[in-house]
Amino acid sequence: MSVAGSFQGALEYFPCRYGKSRLLFRGPKRALDGRYVAFLGGAETFGRFVESPFPALVERALVERALDDAGIPLPCVNLGVINAGIDLYIGDPAVLNLAARADLCVIQVMGAQNMSNRFYGVHPRRNDRFLRASDRLQQLFPEVDFTEFHFTLHMLGRLREISEERFAEVTAELRLAWVARMKHLLTLLGGRAVVLWAAGHTPPETHVNALSPAPLFIERGMIEALRPRAAALLDRPLSAGSLQAGTEGMIFADFEAAAAAEALSPAAHEEIAAALTPALSELLTREE
């Protein structure tokens, strides 16, 4: 999808690029010649339909704290991309370099479905796009014609309908790949990353092989496995009030109403920013 608000009533996202990356990010474009905090993630980080997503709210709060302490406020760079998976960041050297140069990064926990693995491959920039099934997956599901699929969720939903037992083999691989990929990303960032859980439920204690709620196929043990390589883990769930706020305060065109109803509300973004700000302030203070 285009991130520009080019339709009447739609929100203007001021799309921009950084460096040599081919990806479009939410603007306005920020200066990156000094210190900054980078935010990586999916639609929640991007802030679809929300005028002030949590990266912008955190920046505002950090500016206020810096002025109170006579410090220098740090810009917060929103590198969130709708439908992003971990592959989008690891596979883009320009964006990875931006993240590595940041004082701190915030990485939203993204689902395990939108990344390449031993069963299937996804598009390197549009990670929700299914590209191909491996020989291994074709052997596991010989009755499936994989050429009919264009999106990972469509393909995974069909596999689950055919056989939950065989589908569980796929999700087990996704979990292993997700942990390995996240550990690699955190290592590349030198331990200067906060892992953020941005959902209305706590990370499940056991395997959940359903196609909802997001982030898909992630459980607590997977998050805990990242703790030694992360600066902090924030896994407090969003409140019922913010989840039930609906589309109040959102900006969208009429044809976007269904998608807006599934997005995080402005109240949810405010909750995330309120949890992130003190954690980031403490970590930034330690580094000074």
Image (cartoon, rainbow, N blue to C red):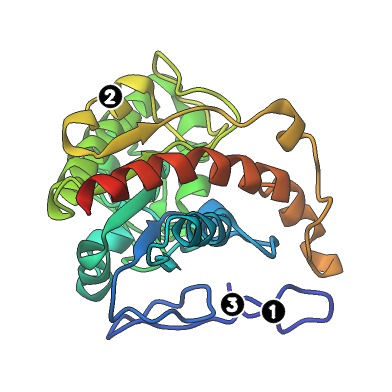
**Which of the two discs, 2 and 3, labels the residue nearer the N terminus?**
3
The local crowd at label 1, few if under 14, some if 14 to 19, many if 20 or more residues have their Cα within 10 Å, is: some
**How far apart in space, not on screen, are marks 1 and 3 (Cα)?**
8 Å
Q: In which quarter of the image is the N terminus?
A: bottom right
Toward the viewer: 270 or 141? 270
**How far apart in space, not on screen, are marks 2 and 3 (Cα)?**
35 Å
Toward the viewer: 262 or 245? 245
Toward the viewer: 26 or 140? 26
In which image quadrant can residue 33 be found?
Answer: bottom left
To which residue does mark 2 refer? 224
The local crowd at label 2, few if under 14, some if 14 to 19, many if 20 or more residues have their Cα within 10 Å, is: few
Residue contact at pointers 1 and 2, CB within 8 angstroms:
no
Could you tell me residue 28's position as x and y percent? 54, 80
**Which of the two discs, 1 and 2, labels the residue nearer the N terminus?**
1
SS category of the residue bearing label 1: loop
In which image quadrant can residue 111 be found?
Answer: top left
**How far apart in space, not on screen, are marks 1 and 2 (Cα)?**
38 Å
Q: What residue type is labelled 3?
A: Ser
SS category of the residue bearing label 2: helix
Q: Which amino acid does label 2 sit on?
A: Glu
To which residue does mark 1 refer? 5
Residue contact at pointers 1 and 3, CB within 8 angstroms:
no
**Residue 112 in view:** no
Q: Which amino acid does label 1 sit on?
A: Gly
Residue under the image location 35 percent in, 81 percent down: 18
To which residue does mark 3 refer? 2
**Residue 119 in view:** yes
**Residue 155 against residue 170 in the figure, above or below:** below
Q: In which quarter of the image is the C terminus?
A: bottom left
Could you tell me residue 115's position as x and y percent? 32, 51
SS category of the residue bearing label 3: loop
